[in-house]
């Protein structure tokens, strides 16, 4: 850099300082977002040979062949162009039939296709939340749900689940007391990531009536609704706010293709929302992603229309894996674990988990075992770790063996 160029840079820096510009940083609300501790643990595993990764929320199985074939056919047929902001008509129609079968009459006009479930959560928040609004969330919780309103300038208050002999439970009175007049939105994830806790229909009815009285929006993250083991009936779904709410009241249900059809990498989801929101939602989709990829949407049609047998078999496999891992962990000294009603995780305590991030990093480095720290899901999750059991039981057994060796080396087991 020449002397003259250096002088210009120095002058610009002084000018920026004089006008309060400061360093070229992101705005404060973004800088304050918490980073992913799950990614931090995964990064600690780079370079460690033979790590068993149970930290991410996905199966170790690939997307079913009939869905992959549908995407290949769509690509071969040239499905590479923009679509309607709210999704292609065949997919919205398929989803309306699917949702109607599970939760009662739902028209395509109430369906919007999104570029993944997390995109649907962001769009739902953008629709109803702004700077200065108050949001309530039930925790421990996948951090995206807590952090998304903060990006928009809202404040988030949390109501923590309790852990005891019956596993994870909700103090309903405490939640209702927190949902005060003036609250803009309740974000609730059931079945829950990370705990597997599932809200009962009676609890949903009480919360819905309370939110109606106070004009509070409910954004229900129901991406795990099909991964539910409550009463054992094939094809069942977890209790949903859609079972109780009219389609044109203040309830937005978020869903995803990631879990029930093993399509995590496809980034395809949907919203069920009041028709009054759809024009504005279309504008938000345009300014976020424009639309989900056409060939992915066409694969989604096949997943919904032809995937029920697969989904039911998947849930049966997950139930067996859950029961297998619970039994194995209950035999490990110092572990406290209960079988949850839904999702695909065990969220349990073990010695050392009071500093769960440090513990999980040690497990990776010393035992080649990858678990997610409870603190990744908020301070309410500290003292616990999350284990995704969506994999072959042989791998689960190998993981339990590594955990036992790790605890024994520390004089625990």
Image: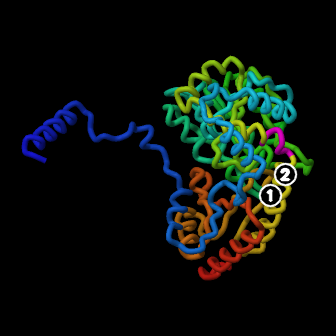
In terms of depth relative to the viewer, which is nearer, 307 or 348? 307
Circles 1 and 2: CB distance less than 8 Å? Answer: yes
Neighbours of disc 2 within 10 Å: few (<14), some (14-19), many (20+): many
Q: Main secondary structure of the magenta part?
A: helix
Please tell me whether residue 323 belongs to the stretch shown in magenta.
no
Percent position (x, y) of residue 287? 52, 27
Residue linked to disc 2: 229
Quadrant (top left/top right/bottom left/bottom right) for the C terminus: bottom right
- Residue appearing at x 74%, y 73% in the figure: 397
Q: Is residue 51 visible?
A: yes
**What is the magenta range?**
303-308
Single out the mark in the foreground, 1 or 2.
1
Of the two numbered discs 1 and 2 on the same chain, state the one appearing first in sequence. Answer: 2
**Residue 188 in view here:** no
Residue displayed at 80% across by 55% down: 166
Quarter of the image for residue 363 reads: bottom right
Q: Secondary structure at mark 1?
A: helix
**Residue 318: which disc?**
1
Return the x and y of residue 403 as percentages of the image width and height.
66, 74
Compare residues 276 and 381 and report the one nearer the observer. 276
Residue 250 left/right relative to 97: left
Q: Is residue 129 above or below residue 64?
A: above
User: Could you give the CA–CA distance between mark 1 and mark 2, rounded to whole angstroms?
Assistant: 9 Å
Q: Residues within 10 Å of mark 1 (few under 14, many from 20)?
A: many
For the point 53% across and 72% down, the residue is 48
Where residue 55 sits in the image (x, y, percent)?
Answer: 62, 60
In what element is the residue under mark 2? Answer: loop
């Amino acid at each position: 850099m020449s002397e003259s160029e250096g002088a210009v840079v120095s002058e610009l820096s002084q000018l920026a300082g004089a006008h309060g510009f400061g360093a070229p940083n992101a705005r404060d609300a973004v800088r304050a977002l918490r980073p992913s501790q799950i990614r931090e643990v995964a990064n600690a595993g780079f370079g460690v040979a033979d790590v068993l990764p149970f930290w991410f929320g996905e199966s170790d199985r690939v997307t079913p062949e009939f869905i992959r074939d549908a995407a290949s056919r769509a690509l071969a047929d040239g499905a590479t162009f923009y679509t309607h902001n709210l999704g292609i008509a065949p997919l919205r129609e398929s989803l309306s039939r699917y949702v109607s079968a599970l939760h009662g009459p739902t028209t395509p006009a109430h369906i919007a296709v999104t570029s993944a479930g997390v995109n649907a959560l962001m769009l739902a928040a953008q629709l109803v939340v702004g700077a200065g609004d108050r949001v309530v969330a039930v925790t421990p919780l996948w951090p995206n749900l807590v952090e998304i309103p903060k990006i928009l300038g809202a404040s988030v208050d949390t109501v923590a689940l309790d852990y005891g002999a019956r596993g994870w439970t909700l103090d309903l009175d405490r939640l209702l007391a927190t949902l005060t007049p003036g609250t803009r939105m309740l974000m609730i994830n059931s079945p829950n990531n990370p705990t597997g806790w599932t809200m009962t229909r009676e609890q949903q009815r009480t919360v819905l009536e309370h939110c109606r009285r106070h004009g509070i929006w409910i954004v229900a993250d129901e991406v795990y609704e099909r991964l539910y083991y409550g009463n054992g009936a094939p094809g069942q779904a977890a209790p949903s706010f859609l079972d109780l709410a009219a389609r044109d009241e203040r309830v937005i249900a978020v869903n995803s293709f990631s879990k029930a059809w093993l399509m995590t990498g496809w980034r395809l989801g949907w919203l069920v929302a009041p028709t009054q929101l759809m024009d504005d939602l279309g504008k938000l989709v345009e300014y976020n992603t424009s639309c989900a990829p056409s060939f992915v949407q066409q694969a989604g049609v096949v997943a919904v229309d032809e995937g029920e047998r697969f989904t039911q078999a998947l849930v049966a496999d997950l139930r067996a894996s859950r029961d297998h891992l619970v039994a194995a962990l209950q035999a490990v000294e110092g572990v406290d674990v209960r079988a949850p009603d839904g999702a695909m995780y065990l969220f349990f305590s073990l010695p050392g988990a009071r500093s769960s991030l440090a513990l999980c990093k040690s497990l990776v480095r010393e035992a080649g075992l990858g678990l997610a720290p409870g603190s990744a899901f908020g301070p309410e999750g500290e003292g616990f770790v999350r284990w995704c059991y969506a994999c072959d039981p042989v791998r689960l057994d190998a993981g339990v063996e590594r955990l036992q060796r790790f605890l024994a080396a520390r004089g625990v087991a």
